[in-house]
Amino acid sequence: MSFGIFLQHLHHGSSSVRSVPQGCRLPAAAMLALSLTLLACTSSTLALERSGFATPPAGSYRLQRILGTPEGLVLDSDGSRQKLSRYTTGRITLFSFIYTYCTDAQGCPLAYATFHNLKKTIEGSPGMRDKVRFVSMSFDPQYDTPEAMRNYGGKDARDTMGVPWHFLTSRTRSDLLPLLEGFGQDVSVAAAQPDGQRIPMLSHMLKVFLIDAHGQVREIYSPAFLRQEMMFNDIQTLLMEQNIKR
């Protein structure tokens, strides 16, 4: 099994008041996955509303520094090898690990749909477009080549006018492993490859990391808290913090 390293369940001491569990997109099944994702989003939102959770106004709270982002080498979707810090510093960043053939409606498709919709919201908000970026990075350097990531990102990967959205992968698993460990991102092989099928099923806990311009993780969202209003307010809160320090 070529995914030997993923058999290790990677755990890290990171935590967040909003962190919790599970998590992914198959290009051929994109429409079905997105439909299931929308249902999942609706269910999560209803569950939070029923629990009495209300999104606080931007700037009325402080986001703690949870951990620093790791450094390492990654491949951009144009095939160029870059330092990860190029994509985790200098702007407020939303970062998530994904793999392109994931079909878990509570996983990678949910992260993709949330980023896609939030990107439009930010682009419609004055003063935010040039201060925010999104990053989707693959768990699977074997199958998710730069070309596969570029195809997965579609128009969002080619958009040079709006909020930048980078679709990254790594050259080898030995390049990827320190990044998974540094973020405290779990992943394992959920099922062996059936005969005739090349792609394994991966299992992971979906996490979306909110990173400030200095490369510090300030929030970790689980699927239950992937709410656009909350994430938008958190980004605005970090922007307000930046403006106060200037």
Image: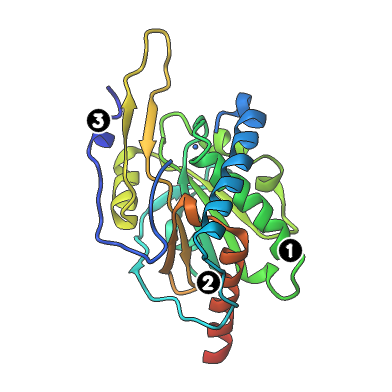
**Residue occupied by mark 1:** 123
Q: Is residue 246 visible?
A: no
Q: Residues within 10 Å of mark 3 (few under 14, many from 20)?
A: few
Q: Amino acid at mark 2?
A: Gly
The x, y position of residue 38, in whole percent, is: 63, 42
Badge 1 element: helix
Would residue 211 be found to the left or right of residue 55 on screen?
left
User: Residue 50: which quarter of the image?
Assistant: bottom right
| Residue sitting nearer the eye, 84 or 228 | 228
Furthest-left residue in this view: 8
Secondary structure beneath disc 2? loop
**Residue at image mark 2:** 90
Q: Amino acid at mark 3?
A: Gly
Q: Quadrant of residue 140?
A: top left
Residue drawn at the location 45% of the way across and 74% of the way down: 214
Which quadrant of the figure contains the C terminus? bottom right
Q: Name the disc covering residue 4, or none.
A: 3
> Can you tell which of label 1 and label 2 is closer to the viewer?
1
What color scheme is it? rainbow
- State the CA–CA distance, disc 3 to disc 1: 41 Å
| Above-or-below relation of 135 to 101 | below
Residue 234's place in the image compared with 112, above or below, is: below
Q: Secondary structure at mark 3?
A: helix
Image coordinates of residue 184 in percent, x first then y, are 31, 54
Q: Earlier in the sequence, mark 1 or mark 2?
A: 2
Camera sees residue 16: yes
